Image (tube, grey):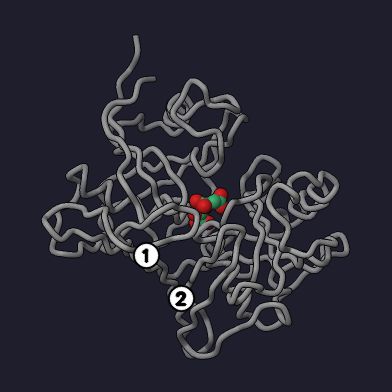
Amino acid sequence: MQQAIPYMQIRGGSSKGLYFRATDLPDDPEARDQLLLDAVGRDARQIDGLGGANPLTSKVAVVSPSSRPDADVDYLFVQVVVGENRVDTTPNCGNILAGVGAFALESGMLPVTGDVTSVRVYMVNSGNACELLVQTPNGEVEYRGDARIDGVPGTAAPVICNYMDIAGSACGSLLPTGQVRDEINGIPVTCIDNGMPVVVLRAADFGKSGYESCEELSADTGFRERLEAVRLQAGERMGLGDVTRKVVPKMTLITAPHAGGHVCTRTFIPHACHSSIGVLGAVSVATACILPGSVAEGIAVVPDGRNRKLAVEHPSGEFSVELQLDEAGQVVKAGLLRTARLLSRGELYV
Ligand code: NQM
C-alpha cells in the first residue's frame, strides 16, 4: 500500500524543498529520515522521488508550532545527500528557511496578522532564531512582487530575514579553532561559523584566480582532492569530528571583488560547486571579511561602521548581507533579503 503524506513544495530563496508538518511525519528520527529519503529519492537521479538530483533541490523542512516563548514555529532542516541514500541534519539552511513563513501561514499553523506578518522561527538544527517578515497584504501570503535575488529568474515578494545570535550555530563558537587564521596542509584558512560552518580559503593559494566557472573548478579533480583533504582536517579542528559523511564545513574560495562587490566567492557544498552561495554561508563569509587577521584581509574591501552592508559576489551575481555590530565589534544581527514561492501542495506518496 502506498502511504499519502500531506506536503507543500516551496522555492525558498535559491533552493527548493519539501515542507512538512512535524505531525505528518513519524516521531522517531530514524523512521522520519527513511520516509524523507523515499520522498526525495534515494539514488543519484532521484528518479523515484520528488528531488531534483542537486543539493539545492534535495532539501526538506519539518515545521511545527513552537512551545518557546520567543518563537512561533520550530523548523528542522534535513539535507538529503544526493546519491548517497542518507540525510544530514547537522547544518541549517537559510534559503529553505525563507519559505517557512509561507508554509506556516498556508498550512494554517499561524494566522496572518496584517499587511506584513512576522514569523519568529526557532532553527532546531542550530538552536538560533530568525524573524521572517512575510508580505500578507490581503489576508493571505502575497508571492508577487518586485524583489529580485540572484539565482532565481524574475521577481517576487520580498521576505526579510533577520537572524539573531547565530555565531557558533553548529560548532559552538564563531571561531571554532580558537584562532582567526590557521594553516592546514600549508594553506592559510579561516574556520568560521556565523550560522554555517565554513572554511574560507584564498583561491590564489590553490593556484586559482577565483573567477573560474563552477564547471571549470569541478573538472579539476586534483584541486578538489586537495580541497577535500583540507576540509577533513578543518572539520576535526572545528569540533565537527570526522566530516567525511557530513555536508559541513562548506568550503569557500575567495578573491578580490570584480563586479563592484566586497569579495568574490566560489563555494563548495561541500563537494558540488554552488551556483551562487548559501544564505548562512554568505553570512559566515561576510563575517570573516570584517575580522582583522582573517585570510580575507587584503582581499575583501570592507566598509566601516556599526551597520555594514557587504555584497558577496558569487558565480551568478551577488548576495548582500547587512551585518549589525555591537560596541565591541561583534556581529549581533544579520539581515538579508530572500523571496519564496509556493510551487505545489497536496499529498506525496511513499
Ligand atoms: O547557507 C546551500 C543553499 C544552501 C544552504 C548549501 C543555505 C545556507 O543555497 O544557509 O541556504 O550551503 O548547501 O540553500
CB contact under 8 Å: marks 1 and 2: no
Q: Residue drawn 55% across and 63% down?
A: 317
- Kindly indicate the quadrant of the structure image that contains residue 68: bottom left
Q: Specify whether residue 180 is in view.
A: no
**Residue 91, position as x, y percentages in the image:** 53, 51
**Label 1: few (<14), some or many (≥20) within 10 Å?**
many
Q: Residue drawn 20% across and 46% down?
A: 109
Q: Hey, what amino acid is under mark 2? A: Glu
Q: Quadrant of the N terminus?
A: top left
Q: Residue extending furthest right?
A: 186
**Residue 338, position as x, y percentages in the image:** 39, 60
Q: Hey, what amino acid is under mark 1? A: Cys
Q: Is residue 57 left or right of residue 43?
A: left
* Viewer-proximal residue among 285 and 233: 285
Location of mark 2 (residue): 322
Provide the secondary structure element on which disc 1 rests. Answer: strand
- Sequence-wise, the earlier of marks 1 and 2 is 1
Location of mark 1 (residue): 161
Q: Specify whether residue 229 is in view.
A: yes
Q: Residue extending furthest front?
A: 154
